[in-house]
């Protein structure tokens, strides 16, 4: 029988409709062939991107930009711009604010056809360190309320260029989805004096059926109310509200886990398009401390969310806010656990 499951963090109902007859292997098609196009992110084409913000080699930051491993550049077509003032105003019943923010691209590797599992362990860890640095740097701007790091893999997931890259967008407001998480965390802590996310992690480890990978520092699981097939969340097992606080040791463990689960997903689902998103604490220097700001260090918990793009959102989802997931997270997690992969 189908089930409706409530996500205690997003306060969102999900329909787990396993009787729709979709086996995991029925959800994906053959991976499309990669088109041969000019790539501005490839070595030798550095002049085709804006002047870099930061350039890194295997041993750290570079001054001359030669033999680079990771490059951070402004987005050539930014969604938001750095210059200017917010200037919030009312427009009748509506509200507006100038599009102030930041939009950066992290070119993850010189290799055009690599995905995260293809990178060496220390390369993935360095990329996660670059994420941390960009969040830290952008949060120095008091105008910016939230910094989001994300990566789109595959055209169906929004990637306009196949060369592996992540993006960073800093906004002057906290996004609705993150604000909902923050309010849920605050309410849970206010009632129980415990972190909601820590409770979820403890429940998932205790249950075990939705765990995909785990070590003594990081846990990855398919959430109880998964919105899409094979959705995965990745958490530090010990409480930490702000990604900027993650140590290099923790990021090393995170690197191993991300490589493991993304390789499992690639093998199991034939390299599906996906979105990977970092959820972290908003910028504490950006404004008034009320509501969820009061206990955020005790009740929030940074994490990554991964969404394979295997199904389409249609009228029912848009009209109700419900998601219909034809693969139970318990089935998805077991399927991924049983995949044989080479050690990364």
Image (tube, rainbow, N blue to C red):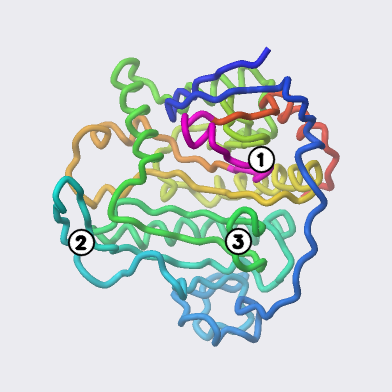
N-terminal label among 3 and 1: 3
Identify the residue shown where x is 79% and y is 30%. 23
Q: Nearer the viewer, mark 2 or mark 1?
A: 1
Q: Nearer the viewer, mark 3 or mark 1?
A: 1
Mark 3 surroundings within 10 Å by alpha-carbon count, few (fewer than 14), some (14 through 19), many (20 or more) = some
**Residue 264 placement (x, y as % from top left):** 76, 42
> Where, by quadrant of the figure, is residue 288 drawn?
top left
**Residue 282 placement (x, y as % from top left):** 33, 46
Q: Quadrant of the N terminus?
A: top right
**Residue 22 placement (x, y as % from top left):** 76, 29
Residue topped by disc 3: 159
SS at mark 1 in the image: loop
**Extreme-front residue of the structure:** 315
Q: CA distance from mark 2 to mark 1?
A: 38 Å
Q: Is residue 40 magenta?
A: no
Identify the residue shown where x is 55% and y is 70%. 60
Q: Which mark is residue 86?
A: 2
Residue topped by disc 1: 311
Q: Which residues are magenta?
A: 306-322
**Residue 223 placement (x, y as % from top left):** 58, 28
Q: Nearer the viewer, residue 299 or 180?
A: 180
> Where, by quadrant of the figure, is residue 71 drawn?
bottom right
SS at mark 3 in the image: loop
């Amino acid at each position: 029988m189908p089930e409706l499951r409530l996500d205690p963090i997003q306060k969102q109902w999900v329909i787990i409709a396993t009787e729709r007859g979709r086996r995991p292997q029925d959800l994906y098609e053959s991976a499309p062939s990669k088109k041969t196009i000019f790539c501005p992110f490839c070595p030798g084409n550095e002049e085709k991107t804006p002047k870099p913000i930061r350039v890194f080699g295997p041993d750290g930051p570079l001054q001359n930009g030669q033999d680079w491993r990771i490059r951070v550049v402004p987005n050539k077509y930014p969604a938001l711009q750095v210059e200017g003032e917010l200037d919030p105003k009312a427009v009748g019943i509506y509200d507006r604010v100038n599009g102030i923010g930041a939009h950066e691209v992290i070119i993850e590797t010189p290799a055009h056809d690599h995905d995260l599992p293809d990178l060496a362990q220390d390369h993935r860890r360095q990329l996660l360190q670059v994420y941390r640095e960009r969040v830290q740097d952008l949060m120095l701007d008091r105008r910016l309320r939230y910094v989001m790091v994300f990566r789109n893999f595959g055209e169906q997931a929004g990637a306009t260029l196949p060369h592996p890259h992540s993006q960073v967008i800093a906004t002057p407001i906290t996004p609705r989805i993150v604000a909902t998480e923050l309010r849920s965390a605050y309410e849970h802590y206010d009632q129980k004096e415990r972190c909601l996310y820590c409770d979820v992690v403890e429940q998932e480890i205790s249950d075990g059926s939705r765990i995909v990978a785990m070590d003594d520092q990081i846990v990855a699981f398919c959430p109880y109310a998964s919105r899409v097939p094979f959705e995965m969340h990745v958490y530090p097992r010990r409480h930490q509200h702000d990604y900027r606080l993650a140590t290099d040791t923790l990021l090393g463990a995170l690197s191993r886990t991300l490589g493991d689960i993304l390789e499992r997903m690639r093998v199991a689902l034939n390299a599906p398009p996906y979105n990977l998103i970092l959820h972290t604490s908003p910028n504490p220097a950006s404004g008034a401390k009320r509501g969820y700001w009061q206990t955020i260090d005790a009740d929030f918990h940074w994490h990554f969310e991964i969404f394979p793009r295997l199904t389409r959102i249609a009228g029912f989802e848009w009209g109700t806010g419900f998601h219909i997931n034809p693969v139970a997270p318990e089935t998805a997690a077991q399927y991924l656990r049983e995949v044989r992969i080479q050690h990364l």
